[in-house]
Amino acid sequence: MATEQVNPGSGRKSKEAVIHSALKLFNMSGYDGTSVRAIAKDAGVNLALVSYYFGGKQGLLEYLMSAFFEGYLQELEQAERDSASKKDTCDRLVYIADMLITYQQKFFYLSRFCHREMTLDNQLVRELMSSYLMKEKYVLIRLFEKILPDAAMDPSAAEFAVLQYRDLIIMPFLQPQFLREVFFLRPSEPSFRINYLHYISRWAKQLTGQRKETGELRSQPNR
């Protein structure tokens, strides 16, 4: 996936240049607010090439969305396998989060666009959810069922933990402008990833040790 590694000044008349321009314009004006003509003009290619490469704007949208989630899921599955050797469950969660955050930083504008599109209700979104996001859920549920102390007694515990964990990983790339304008954070920068992973580590420790900590607090006498 080389969507955001294209040099706009070279190789403009190419499939990569069309992808680069489409992604830029989709982020600026939205999918509905961007025409095929505008994409072709920005890419410096003949209008017919967009249809030749992708079959039109809808085909281009499907390509971008599928490419992003295919890569995202591959990163998740690889990270889940690689982290299995780690004895500390907190380290496993941080390692997987690191891989997914790094992936989204690498394809920052693609991540932002795809996550935003997934908030809509249309046929493409439903198809992506039934394929890629159901697989994501399966991988994460399987992971949390192994590491949560109360997952066996309360199956919903793993599901709610997955929702929290996934939101921590995705939210900065779904709403990067909110982070920049309100909290003055830049999720595309390496320093954000480093500091954010420290927080995720603390969150993971609290989550996996929650039963013990709660018991200790309840055992303390009232003052």
Image (tube, helix red, strand yellow):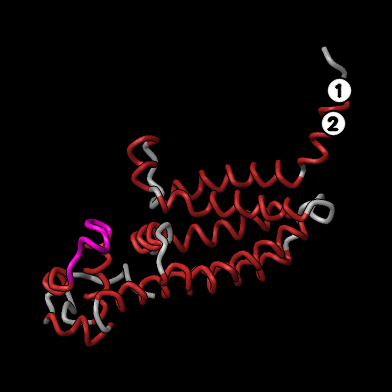
Task: Pick out the residue farthest to the bottom.
Answer: 52
Q: Quadrant of the N terminus?
A: bottom left
Q: Quadrant of the C terminus?
A: top right
Identify the mark at residue 216; answer none if there is no mark: 2
Q: Residue at x 42, y 71 (%)?
A: 123
Identify the mark at residue 220; answer none if there is no mark: 1
Number of on-image labels: 2
Q: Is 106 rendered above or below residue 165?
A: below
Please state the extent of the stretch shown in magenta in the rendering: 27-35
The three-letter amino acid code for the residue at tag 2 is: Glu
SS at circle 1: loop
- Could you say which quadrant of the image residue 109 lies in? bottom left
The three-letter amino acid code for the residue at tag 1 is: Gln
- Could you say which quadrant of the image residue 87 lies in? bottom right
Q: Is 159 rendered above or below residue 3?
A: above
In the image, 123 versus 180, the foreground residue is 123
Q: Is 27 rendered above or below residue 72?
A: above
Q: CA distance from mark 2 to mark 1?
A: 7 Å
Query: Dot 2, crowdedness within 10 Å: few (<14), some or many (≥20)?
Result: few
Query: Dot 1, crowdedness within 10 Å: few (<14), some or many (≥20)?
Result: few
Residues at circles 2 and 1 in contact by the CB criterion of under 8 Å: yes
Rendered location of residue 196, percent (x, y): 52, 45
Task: Pick out the residue farthest to the front.
Answer: 122
Task: Pick out the residue farthest to the top.
Answer: 223
Visible residue check, residue 136: yes
